[in-house]
Amino acid sequence: MAAENLKWWQKSIVYQIYPKSFQDTTGSGTGDLRGVIQHLDYLKNLGAGAIWLTPVYPSPMIDNGYDVADYTAIDPAYGTMADFENLIAEADKRGIKIVMDLVYNHSSDKHKWFLESKSNRTNAKADWYIWRDAKPDGSPPTNWRGIFGGSAWTWCAERQQYYLHSFAVEQPDLNWENPEVRQALYDAANFWLDKGVGGFRIDAIVYIKKPAEFIDGKPDSDGLASVHDVYANTSGILNFLYEFKEKVFAGRDIFTVAEANAVKPEELKYWVGENGAFDMLFEFSHVNIMFAKGEAWHYPYDWKLTELKKVLTDSQKATADNGWYPIYFENHDKPRSVNNFFPKGTDTIKAAKVLAAVLLTLRGTPFIYEGQELGCTNVEWDSIEDYDDIGSHGQYRLMLQEGLTAAQAMKCIHRFSRDNARTPMQWNAEKNAGFSTGKTWLPVNENYKTVNAAAEDKDSDSVLNWYKKLIDLRAANKELISGDYQLLLPESEEIFAFSRSLDGKTFITAVNFSNQKVNLPKDFIDKKIIIDSESNFDKNFLKPLEARIYQ
């Protein structure tokens, strides 16, 4: 596909903001929309063409906004609707689109829809959620386990029935089989489009379709069966998604990217592309490669670079002719990438540059998560009580149940907790990293004195300026936007190398993922080096964690 035929979002960089942790302008300790406005010039200078906001709707914050209590309002903690409208206007002046997060598998249990639904079995919204009678012995209807642990069913005294929640108890699943529910959700999405948003990221969408029969799944060691295994991507889901596209997305100059971690490669053509439900699909094989043997934090898998190269190459191939690939290494649900992909003790500055070189030269739309461009790292707090993330608490309980000591469990929390990516943005070396004048909702990472935007902006060799160089290189060369992808050196366990070619012109990315010097093949030695993460490099080899682009 020629670069001139691509849509704006295919040529853009998307920057994901976790508003709660981005910038506090009131001293509350929680970020807000005015804080986002305050840093729009920073994002423009970085090269962002779109900003994805995680949820800013009214919420009890059981799951940090992914428990929505009103789909067409702004939570007062983040500001007002006028602030949001001002954000859209100010971003538009800088050529930046605002992208909203839609949480449509479930709502908060404090949403007025659920409050009415739970009141009795005969109200107007009685079947807006998923209710079932208890088994004869009073136990839940099935043995399904929620994503955050424990039964996926909770008893409701008012109705004398159980309701289903794929995630937390406070996040009841909406009943997509009810056309009134679907229309209400479509109306909410159109509400934001009418405000001028540039697209949507759609959360947990693979769970909206439930099985025709509610029966027990194959139990794990705790006697429960994960809802992911039971009904993620259930047959018939595409009917809902095609209707969603027709009623909301079709004919608009926006983009949609869905969180869909259960879609098989052969199904991709139905999910993305011209005839698919969405423009892009976040898949998880690369960021979850350490869980290739099962997604339990205490059983990480010692993966090899050839495996990472394969899954990324498979994604490149799957979207080469149909659809478009959203490239990412970090988001609000994952630990910091320098800790996720590299062993403890690694030089995180060099590691950040390695990942940036891959991120910004693969084919697709790069997604940068706040602080990733600074090389932000994980935190290590002493107690589970120091962690806010509901998923971390669920994993901690599971690990203790399976016989791990508290110290062993905390080691896993340190590595994989979602709070690693949710600590306040590190703007400068002042109090609270310049994020807030008040007590911050999560502690600031202790390395903020050196890892911060102000310091890195002045340092020509910083991670931030490396990102800017790569983003500028990508923007100036259509080969890096729409060129064909070809994996090179596929058998190497140290070097990730690939080419991007278009109309006879080729760029080659070569990065050393290892902590050893690696000699390069002869056919690399005479190529023209146009950018290198090491100022003093040797064309014959790559130093440990060195990143290089050839032309």
Image: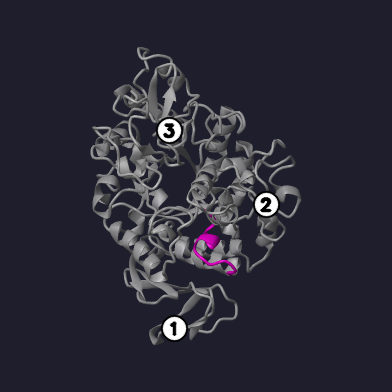
The residue to which callout 2 is attached is 427
The verdict on residue 524 being magenta is no
Q: Identify which residue, 398 or 300, lies in the foreground.
A: 398
Q: Where's residue 403, x and y in %?
A: 50, 52
Q: Amino acid at mark 2?
A: Trp
Q: CA distance from mark 3 to mark 1?
A: 50 Å
Circles 3 and 1, Cβ within 8 Å, touching? The answer is no
The residue to which callout 1 is attached is 520
Q: Secondary structure at mark 2?
A: loop
The verdict on residue 336 being magenta is yes
Q: Is residue 36 visible?
A: no
Q: CA distance from mark 2 to mark 1?
A: 38 Å
Q: For this view, does 388 lie left or right of residue 138?
A: right
Q: Amino acid at mark 1?
A: Leu
- The residue depicted at 72 percent of the width and 37 percent of the height is 27
Marked residue nearer the N-terminal end (2 or 1): 2
Marked residue nearer the N-terminal end (2 or 3): 3
Q: Where's residue 334, x and y in %?
A: 50, 52
Q: Secondary structure at mark 3?
A: helix
- Magenta-highlighted residues: 335-346
Q: Quadrant of the N terminus?
A: bottom left
- The residue depicted at 33 percent of the width and 23 percent of the height is 133
Between circles 2 and 3, the one closer to the viewer is: 2
Q: CA distance from mark 2 to mark 3?
A: 31 Å
Q: Quadrant of the C terminus?
A: bottom left
Q: For this view, does 390 lie left or right of residue 134?
A: right
Marked residue nearer the N-terminal end (3 or 1): 3
